[in-house]
Amino acid sequence: MIDVVKNWFEKHFSDPQAIILITFLVLGSILILYWGKILTPVIAGVVIAYILEGLVCKIMNLGMPRFAAFLISYVLFVTAVTLTLFGLVPLVISQVSQLVVDFPRILNKVQELLLAIPEQYPIFADQEIEKMLGSFSTELVGVGQTLVSVSLSSAVDVFTVLVYLVVVPLLVFFLLKDKTIILRWFRRFLPEDRGLAYSVWKEVDAKMGNYIRGKMVEIFIVGAATFIPLQLMGMNYAATMSLLVGLSVIIPYVGAVAVTIPVAMIAWFQWGGTSEFVYLMAAYLGIQFLDGNILVPLLFSEVVNMHPAAIIISVLFFGGLWGVWGVFFAIPLATLVQAVIHSWPSIQEAN
């Protein structure tokens, strides 16, 4: 048994390049697991700077110097943040507050709909409906309490948000502006013989950068495309629902299904089984169809080549480890795992 383990270890970890690569991965995982919460502003700044670097490179390809490309990209970033803070955020907060106020009325309507089921469908007994109503009411009350607690906790965290709004843009500014200096300083602490780690990073960087930037574009397009029909039809909480729909694209497959439930419920509470409800759901499902069949292939063609089951497992695994960050970076992290497997020396020799 000891010989088997020894042979396996020598086969997979005898190459110094493999040791360097696994050291980078272990240190990075430890850093995120144990100091992730403390370093959240730093991680956010690095991610945003990484996203904006793609825009900087595209502007530089047009013939502009890096400093001018950096300024244009940073001004666009600050403008987007400002519009979000003073345009979208107050509207969403107002609609969420109204949803908390309207929640008892929504609960009463749910009870009326459930109590009417035995009259329309006699196969359901009154006792079954009452039992279902009791459990459903308990769940809805829990949701209402969660909404209230979230609104109260968000008020407590206002100071933290304000700190982040100052620290993160400053970090993005210096990370973008002094990218070359920072990378040169960082390389001083790395071993010179890091060819395998560098090849893995190049493969991941090509896919990860395109994926993250494409996902940000998809969030904006899907959210804006959803807001237009919801707002034109006068649906309650249109901005909040559109924001949820836009953010749902972060979670492949599962997000689209999960966000459809609140959209359909609020539309049903507002219009019932009328033509407005049918038209709105048709428009919403049409947007989901166009997103899945046109927008996603257009933005992510050849970026990620993984089986859907592997994607879902990655979302569950990394989301369980790192929460929202893990969900957002599930596919890039799965791409990293895939690149490591493909580049591992013993595997290359076997092939």
Image (cartoon, rainbow, N blue to C red):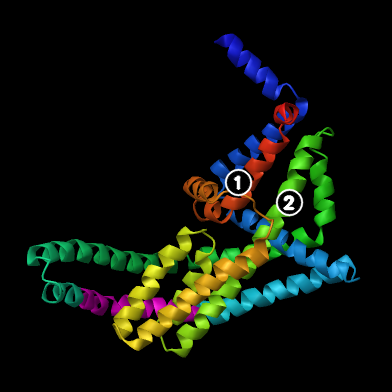
Q: Which residues are magenta?
A: 90-110
Mark 2: which amino acid? Answer: Asp
**In the picture, which quadrant includes the C terminus?**
top right
- Assess disc 2: are there few (<14), some (14-19) or many (≥20) residues with their C-alpha within 10 Å of its C-alpha: some
Horizontal side of 171 relative to 294 (left or right) equals: right
The N terminus, quarter of image: top right
Q: Position of residue 277 (x, y in %)?
A: 36, 83
The question of residue 93 being in magenta is answered with yes
**Left/right of residue 60 with respect to residue 205 in the rendered view:** right
Q: Which image quarter: residue 141? A: bottom left
Using the rendered image of the protein, determine whether residue 137 is visible from the camera's viewpoint: yes
Question: Taking 171 as reference, is 318 above or below it?
Answer: above
Is residue 39 visible in the rendered image? The answer is: no
Bin the neighbour count of mark 1 within 10 Å (Cα to Cα): few under 14, some 14-19, many 20 and up.
many
- In the foreground, 51 or 97: 51
Task: Kindly identify which residue carries mark 2.
Answer: 205
Helix, strand or loop at disc 1? helix
Which residue was labeled with disc 1?
334
Q: Considering only vertical position in the picture, is 329 above or below 159?
A: above
Looking at the picture, tell me which residue is in the foreground, 131 or 41. 131
Residue found 59% across the figure and 13% down from its top: 4
**What is the spatial separation of the Cα atoms under label 1 and label 2, in whole angstroms?**
13 Å
- Of 194 and 228, which appears nearest the observer? 228
Q: In the drawing, does residue 294 fall left or right of residue 309?
A: right
Label 2: which secondary element: helix
Three-letter code, disc 1: Ala
Q: Residue at x 38, y 65 (%)?
A: 150
- Point out residue 312 in the picture as x, y percentages from the top left corner: 50, 50
- Residue 93 lies, with reference to residue 296, above or below; the image says below
* Helix, strand or loop: magenta stretch: helix
